[in-house]
Image (cartoon, helix red, strand yellow):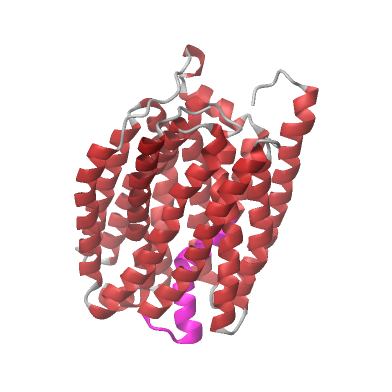
Amino acid sequence: MGREVPAKAGASLVAFLWITLALNYVDRQMVYSIFPVLKTDVGFTDAQLGLIGSVFSWVYTICMPVAGRLADIFRRDRMIVASLVLWSAATLGCSLSGSVMAFLVWRAVMGVTESLYYPAAVGTLGAAYPESARSKVLGIHQSAQFAGIAAGGWYGGWMADRFSWRAGFAIAAGVGILYSLVLARRVPYVPAAPRTTASTGTWATLAEILGSRCYLAICAAFFCFCAMLWVFYAWYPTFLQQRYGLSMTDSGFNATIFVQVSCGLGVIAGGAIADRLSLRTPASRLYVAAAGILLSAPFGYLTFAVHSLNLARVCSCLYGVFAGLLIANIFAASFDVISPRNYGFGAGFLNTVGGVAASIVILVAGLVKDTLGFAGLLTWVGIAGCVSAAALIVTAFRRFSVERYAAPAMSR
């Protein structure tokens, strides 16, 4: 069980980290609304535009397990502040880029620096709050992702249309650096769980985490889920521009506001539901996460398959609500099946899995968008997601029910 903090301090901790995560996603997301101007201003091709997301995801993915391990060893509050400063500097570097290669290099730097934040932040929240509130707390924090994506999608397109995409990046970088001064004074030090001599090694940590079938099932489900999610994040604005003739501002707005607002609502509801159900059924967080995949997949496909903007908006809203059920619970569910001393590494490795899925699907979508199409791609991704969700349900049932009675001495 995590360390409980006073209610006032706890609310403050979540609030300050919420703002930080929102800034994180503003900085990484606004680029996806300015693909057309990057082609004309910097000289990107369609394949190179796909690399913008893939390069970030590749580097972010490679660095995440290391960042997670560091979050279990060093002070997480300092890692959080350092990450914010460094990724803001990388955002400024993007604004100054004069070539495709320079821009991609700075996106890679952003991947390194942003990887330091999430394991430290999630590990801090997991250690600071009791298990009975875990999904709600992590869900509230995660809802900042949707606010940041919605704001970044609109802001990037609006700045490109009205002023300059370079100015938009520079302003975002300045806001992050200024906020780091506030964050350094407001985020408390929450120590990680004590580590025993037998568990301090990296290989021992990796063996413990990957030895859990439930954790591996969570990873598989998250991989499939992120593959669909990142088609939305990276290519939905461009899809709306091409199919419905929207401007960069309008496509950025429509591609983010409906999905992200509904997803935020789904996260809040999913966290509260899972926390309540977990009091009676320990596997509830895993079941709710699996339900999120099963229910969201059809609407993810329909968003790209329909030929009406209003229908696309409705389908994207329904996709967001159900996707929120998984997002609220995926990290909380992983904390239910690993030791508290490994929260940072567990969160980092799980994020690595999501990053691998994102880097693959962003590039593949760019390559097949004119042949197979987004709807065709999402058909196969959705099928894989449903299979992984079913596997997660079966594994969770065995772990928390059958194995619970067959081997009562086994630790969770």
Does the magenta stretch mainly form a helix, a strand or a loop? helix
Q: Position of residue 64 (x, y in %)?
A: 42, 41
Instruction: Give the residues drawn in magenta, as a range.
Output: 225-248
Q: How many marks?
A: 0
Q: Is residue 24 above or below residue 77?
A: below
Question: Magenta includes 253?
Answer: no
The residue sitting at 41% across, 54% down in the picture is 144
* Residue at the top extreme of this rendering: 197
Decide which of 332, 30 is in the foreground and name it.
Answer: 332
> Is residue 326 shown left or right of residue 8?
right
Decide which of 273, 393 is in the foreground and name it.
Answer: 273
The residue sitting at 69% across, 44% down in the picture is 392
Q: Is residue 12 above or below residue 292?
A: above
> Is residue 366 shown left or right of residue 209?
left
Query: Splitting the image into 4 quarters, where does residue 22 fall?
Result: bottom left
Q: Position of residue 141 (x, y in %)?
A: 44, 47
Q: Is residue 312 above or below residue 217?
A: below
Decide which of 247, 139 is in the foreground and name it.
Answer: 139
Decide which of 158, 283 is in the foreground and name it.
Answer: 283
Does residue 358 appear in this view?
yes
Q: Quadrant of the C terminus?
A: top right
Query: Splitting the image into 4 quarters, where does residue 369 fall?
Result: bottom right
Does residue 217 appear in this view?
no
The residue sitting at 28% across, 55% down in the picture is 106
Query: Splitting the image into 4 quarters, where does residue 65 fall?
Result: top left
The residue sitting at 55% across, 82% down in the picture is 310
Q: Position of residue 243 (x, y in %)?
A: 51, 84
